[in-house]
Amino acid sequence: MLSRVADSLYWMSRYLERSENTARLIDVHINSMLDMNVEFVKDQRLHRLQESLISQSEPDSKLTGDEILYDFTLNENQPISIVSTVIGARENARQIREQISSEMWTQINKLYLLVTSTNTTRLWQSAPHNFYLQVKEGSHLFQGITDATMNHNQGWHFIQLGRYIERSLSLLQLLDIHFQDTELESQKDIATNTYFEMVTILKSVSAFEAYCKVYNPNLQSMWIVEFLLFNKEFPRSLRFCIEMIQHSLQTLADTTNRSKNTNLYRMSGRLQSNLSYDDIRDVHDLHAYIQDIKIQIYQIHVMLYDTFITYPIESAL
Amino acid sequence: MTRSLLATLVDQYSIHETAYDETFTMDHQSRDAYKILLNRLLELSPEDLIFRQQASDTTFLNDGITFTVYDDKKGTERTFPFDILPRIITGKEWNTIETGLIQRIRAINFFLQDIYHEGRIFDDGIIPYEIVASAKHYRREMKGVNVPHKVYVSICGSDLVRLPDGSFAVLEDNLRVPSGVSYMLANRQITKNVFPKLFNNYGVRPVDQYGQALLSIMQSLVPHHEDPNIVLLSPGVYNSAYYEHTYLARQMGIQLVEGRDLLVHNNIVYMRTTSGLQRVDVIYRRIDDDFLDALTFRPDSQLGVNGLFNAYRAGNVVLANAVGTGVADDKAIYAYIPSIIKYYLDEDPILQNIETYLLSDEKQRDYVIKNIDKLVVKAVGEAGGYGMLIGPHSTKKEQEEFIDAINANPRNYIAQPTLSLSTAPCFLDGNIEARHIDLRPFVLCGKDKYTIVPGGLTRVALRKGSLVVNSSQGGGSKDTWVLYE
């Protein structure tokens, strides 16, 4: 398959995953604020939301609460807003329209029309939950249509890679921000405030129900982190994401006749096996642990490009 | 028995006074080929017909069968209006068209080989060297370049018109990157879906094999390879014919590439794939010469591939069509095509040319300027209905502007009599009305073989009285049925 096509599929998928994550984070945030009346905590939460969404630049502190939410949702000049990322996904899909199924194109186009239509602002103001729900559903539907209508060939694996790389990075960002100043606890009595905070975190990655099935509603921070990092079955856990990445990388090596004896495969293999053997009780500095994994994922992204897409010509002749 | 409403509509159909009508004779009798069609149509109600028209419009929209209009601020993608009443060509008429077009393309390929090599035709005084060398699409860079099997033009889409006496004539040859073939194929699909009963047992020759035919033509151009890598080079999503590029690539089962997917190393063309670099043997290019290679042609081109022309000259890649074919569809050189056919093949042209005035000739120029209100003036290097003046439909001011332009650069213009293109009944807003049409069949030439899929794109000038059929100028299209008999 053409490298350009792989590139577009990868970014289409990353952008769309990003819009879904942003929609879920903001939706949960708005909902959790309804239960909260202490101004100080409200500000703190808002600040965390900003930090969870923006990874590189400093958040703009001059904006008020509603302005921040608008900025992340409908501001076309904000590159990480939902509307910008949906436009990015659709633009990438448009470049390779003949490579994806027509059902996929119709679905991503519908989502695009939803977020760019003239009455979107009104819909968002009057029923924000409804708006975010539609974005999430739009993305879910696209993923389902993709799995059901597209050949599970190379292109499909690049879509998978985009989705899981984006998903794991945003999960790590979320964990890092929320647990940066807290000791991980496993047996503490939980105050009401903390309880709500833990629920928020879990819901931000739609993990609340899945978590409760494994640990009961015993919201200890240590078990939450354990669940989100190391659970093998939950589709938004880090380990699950990395296993999907590893699986797609393996398939790509087989279908393109490439050696697996390269840094890319050493890196992803090592990360996968670390995650299957690591234990939360051995993680003493969560921030450092997360930073380390983030760097490894960035490197996987870079090496993925070096191997399949932007490889130097000399290496390929 | 009461006459059906549709029969009344047909009765009210007014036949053009001068033009040849495809369906009816002057005394309102239907022509033989259309008799069964009309009888079957008359069984339908107008509502039925409207319903079928809507069904076909919806299909076009949903399938995204669109083209792009440049300089249009209101959304750039449009569907190509489709008229559901088919146009029929009899087997006998088709034979003339087929043999005539093949004769023409053979001669044109000889001509191109000659002008880019020995130039015998200049020495023998058939056509002045200046006319060829000054053509906008003449490529000096092609001098002495050997083209595989001497096939310069592999794909040609000549525009034919039918004159009042019922004979076909060639209005122009499109020898660079002719487009429209996807509409020929899509129109047929839709007719079959919408009018299965009408179509059934009519003896219409199929056209669906076009993609396969094109592929086998491309394969025949590579001499040494068992399994050549053939790609379609498109300028990308912003090009007006992008839909057609994706459609053809899919039909032919080949990769659709853009310039940025290709690279040249040591005069070999490669495409960048996830499995590494892959050599490219044939490029079906849908990019004009100008934009192919910034190192040889326009340096500002972002669409092409640097170094492509050198790889081509070295014989390492086949381009279809070859570079420099546009010189032969220059509208001034068009005037010489009958002599070109005579010179290379020693045959009389089967299809006639339209009488053409060369404005670089002083006498002809004077005549044209005096009679500009009766003639059609065209810029020689343009296509798509741009840069032309239709005398009888123009204002004094437009005529004066053209006269100034002609005097400033006479070589750049030709003039032709205003033709009465043939008309055909079209179903428009619940009425059946006559509109002018033309025909663009697609000729394929490979190594020692010529193929014309029996059919073509019939374009319709949808505006009443208009003679301009181009899609960018408000034209539509019809399905074209070529019969076995």
Image: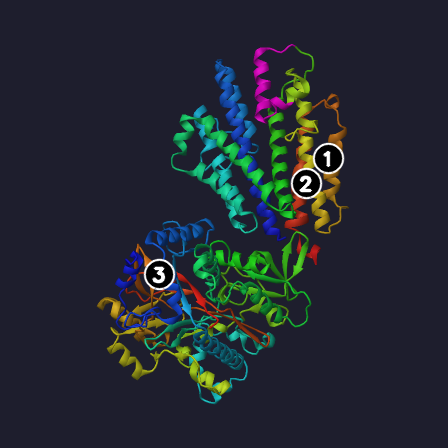
Q: Amino acid type of disc 1?
A: Leu
Q: Decide if residue A65 is on the left or right side of residue B419.
A: right
Counting from the top left corner in percent of width and height, residue A200 is at 57, 21
Q: Depth-wise, is mark 1 or mark 3 nearer the camera?
A: 3
**Residue denoted by label 2:** A300
Q: Amino acid type of disc 3?
A: Gln
Q: CA distance from mark 3 to mark 2?
A: 52 Å
Quadrant containing the N terminus of chain B is bottom left
**Residue denoted by label 3:** B473
Q: Which disc number belongs to residue B46?
A: none
Q: Earlier in the sequence, mark 2 or mark 1?
A: 1
Answer whether residue A195 is magenta in the image.
Answer: yes
- Mark 1 and mark 2 in contact (Cβ < 8 Å)? yes
Q: CA distance from mark 2 to mark 1?
A: 10 Å
Does residue B203 appear anywhere in the picture? yes
Q: Decide if residue A204 is on the left or right side of residue A68.
A: right
Give the secondary structure at mark 1.
helix
Over which residues does the magenta segment extend? A189-210
**Residue denoted by label 1:** A271
Which residue is pictured at 49% across the width and 30% down the height? A132
Furthest-left residue in view? B396
Counting from the top left corner in percent of width and height, residue A55 is at 57, 32
Counting from the top left corner in percent of width and height, residue A160 is at 63, 40
Answer whether residue A194 is magenta in the image.
Answer: yes
Which residue is pictured at 70% across the width and 56% down the height? A316
Counting from the top left corner in percent of width and height, residue B126 is at 44, 87
Q: Chain of mark 1?
A: A
Q: Chain of mark 3?
A: B
